[in-house]
Image (cartoon, rainbow, N blue to C red):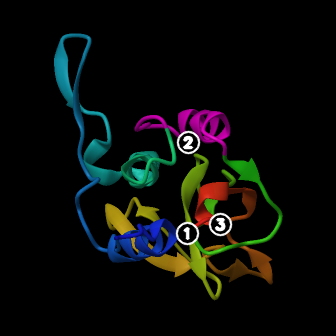
Amino acid sequence: MIKQLKKESYLKFIKNSAGVSTWRNFYAEVGGVKKDVLKNGDLSCAFFATSVLLIFGLIKKVHFTVKGAVRDLEKSGWKEIKELRPGAVLIWEKNKFFSNEHIGFYLNKERAISNYFLKKKPFQHHFTYGTINGLPKRKIIKIFWHKELDES
């Protein structure tokens, strides 16, 4: 008998996503015009995160915005937690350096992975993108956890 190890597979899948261009483009017809709605990787964070979550059955569908992703997380049984855990979904604030909220995953040891618009693909980074004058460069505003990740 084979027992699925969801959490272990999920964490390895996330970690192995670093440097991959898979989530860079998605085409749609907008007002009768074909358009890359992810702008060649500039807007791929929600697409990356929700694609991973959908593959593991932890969300209902793929989203292109953080707002849509958060609504689906809440409807799919994800709960806000206070402490970082490997595999948790992170939502970062928008601030003077970043004009949109951002979504990604916590790995461990202060490391996270999310799509980086300059590299146009997911990459590993400090979970607050480092610090400026001792303060986080990008503050985490929500941490989500799903109970299914406890069961495997």
Q: Is residue 63 left or right of residue 2?
A: right
Q: Is residue 74 left or right of residue 117?
A: right
Tag 3's secondary structure? loop
Q: Of marks 2 and 1, which one's residue comes earlier in the chain?
A: 2
- Magenta span: 60-77
Tag 2's secondary structure? helix
Within 10 Å of disc 2 (Cα), the crowding (few <14, some 14-19, many 20+) is: many
Within 10 Å of disc 3 (Cα), the crowding (few <14, some 14-19, many 20+) is: few
Q: Which residue is mark 2?
A: 66
Residue at 60% across / 35% down in the picture? 67
| Viewer-proximal residue among 91 and 50 | 50
| Viewer-proximal residue among 146 and 46 | 146
Asked whether the beta carbons under mark 3 and mark 1 sit within 8 Å of each other, the answer is: yes
Closer to viewer: mark 2 or mark 1: 1
Q: Which residue is mark 3?
A: 150
| Viewer-proximal residue among 119 and 63 | 63
Residue 68 within the magenta-colored segment of the rendering: yes
Q: Position of residue 150 (x, y in %)?
A: 65, 66
Task: Give residue 99's mark.
Answer: none
Q: CA–CA distance between discs 2 and 3? A: 24 Å
Residue kind at label 3, given as amino acid type: Asp
Residue kind at label 1, given as amino acid type: Ser
Would residue 146 be seen by someone viewing this image from the given angle?
A: no
84, above or below 39, in the image: below
Tag 1's secondary structure? loop
Residue kind at label 2, given as amino acid type: Val
Residue at 55% across / 54% down in the picture? 103
Q: Which residue is mark 1?
A: 152
